[in-house]
Structures are given as structure tokens and as C-alpha cells.
Amino acid sequence: MRKVIASLYITLDGIVEHPAWTAPYFNEEGAAYARTQLFAADALLLGRATYQGFTQAWPSMTDEDGFADRMNAMPKYVATTTLDTPEWNATFLTDDVPTAVAELKQQDGGDLLVYGSGDFVNTLLEHDLIDELRLWTCPVVEGTGKRLFTETSPKKTLRPIGVTTFSSGLQVLAYAPAKEGSA
């Protein structure tokens, strides 16, 4: 059974939109963590907006350690009701997305990695489909922008399972869903 790992950049005040504010905090330690995370996965799960942003940038990227090659080669599963022409190794999940993701989880293979995609992450949380939530927390207060959790986010209890702190001040806070009856 595969695990769904959601990995998002976030500010201290919960902003996940347009993460240009991550640049000062991303260093070699963060790159190594990101590489390990990507290579543990064998497919990406993406929301439509993240997918569209990624397809503008990633197909032309190259690097020396194989990160871009891995990113470009792996299958992508995209939650969308508006797109109709998949590209960049994508399969569109257009109907019952939670059921489709649950079926993907039942398959053999590596992790299913979700980058960004805040609305999609909330949908996956609502349907108990996230096994681990990794919040790449930057010591920044952005003030305005799209927040990961809003008044309409599903109520969930998460338990901390790890903290990775980089010398830049960036911290990856890892959470798993709490078992029923525990905090």
C-alpha cells in the first residue's frame, strides 16, 4: 500500500500562495531533504493550479543530480474538472477524485507525493487520504494570501511525527493523522 505525502511551503501565518518567500531559506540541506522526498515517491498528485504552474517551469529544467529528470519522468495524477489535454506524463482525475486517490493508494509502489495544492490537500484530509503532512515552515509572516487552512477546512487532529530544522531557519514539521480517540 502506498502512502500519500503532502509537502507544502508555508509561512508562520499559514500562507501557501506564491512561495517566493522561501528563497532565502532554501539551502543545500533543504535540497537534500527535497531530493530524498522526491526519490521516495514514484508518482505526484497535484491540484490543477500547481500542475499548471509546474508545466510552465519543469519540462525545460535540468540539473546535475537528477532531480529535474526524476520530476519530469514520473507519472502525475492531477485533480481537475476544467483541463482536458494532459501533458507532462499526466493523467487527469476528473470524476470522484477521493475514490481515485484511494485506489492509487491501494496499488503497490512508492509514495504518492503532493506538492503545494492547498485546496486538494484539504480535500484529501477531509477523506482521510493523507498519511503524512510535511509543512516546510519559513520564519516569515506574509500577512495576506491564500492560507492552507480556512474556516471551511475539515476539522482534523494531527500528531507530530518529526521536525527537521535547517541552518537557514526553515523547519519541516511532519504530522500524521491522529488515531481515533488520541490526540
Image (tube, rainbow, N blue to C red):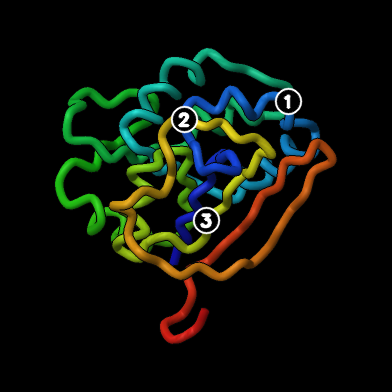
Q: Quadrant of residue 54?
A: top left
Task: Examine the rendered structure and indicate whether residue 156 appears above or below residue 77.
Answer: below
* Residue at horizontal 32 percent and vertical 38 percent from the top: 78
Amino acid found under the numbered disc labelled 1: Pro
Which residue occupies the extreme right position in the image? 167
Give the mark, 1 or 3, whose residue is nearer the N terminus. 1
Q: Secondary structure at mark 3?
A: strand
Amino acid found under the numbered disc labelled 2: Thr
Q: Mark number for residue 24?
A: 1
Q: CA distance from mark 1 to mark 3?
A: 23 Å
Q: Secondary structure at mark 2?
A: loop
* Image depth: mark 1 or mark 3 in front: 1
Amino acid found under the numbered disc labelled 3: Leu
Residue 106 visible:
no
Q: CA distance from mark 1 to mark 2?
A: 19 Å
Residue 169 visible:
yes
Which is more toward the observer, 160 or 149?
Answer: 149
| Side (left or right) of 52 relative to 143 | left
Q: Position of residue 136 (x, y in %)?
A: 62, 44
Which is more toward the observer, 86 or 22?
Answer: 22
Q: Position of residue 26 (x, y in %)?
A: 72, 31
Q: Position of residue 168 (x, y in %)?
A: 80, 36
Q: Secondary structure at mark 1?
A: helix
CB under 8 Å between callouts 1 and 2? no
- Per the image, the residue denoted by label 2 is 144
Give the mark, 1 or 2, whose residue is nearer the N terminus. 1
Task: Examine the rendered structure and indicate whether residue 169 appears above or below residue 56.
Answer: below
* Residue at horizontal 44 percent and vertical 67 percent from the top: 1
Q: CA distance from mark 2 to mark 3?
A: 23 Å
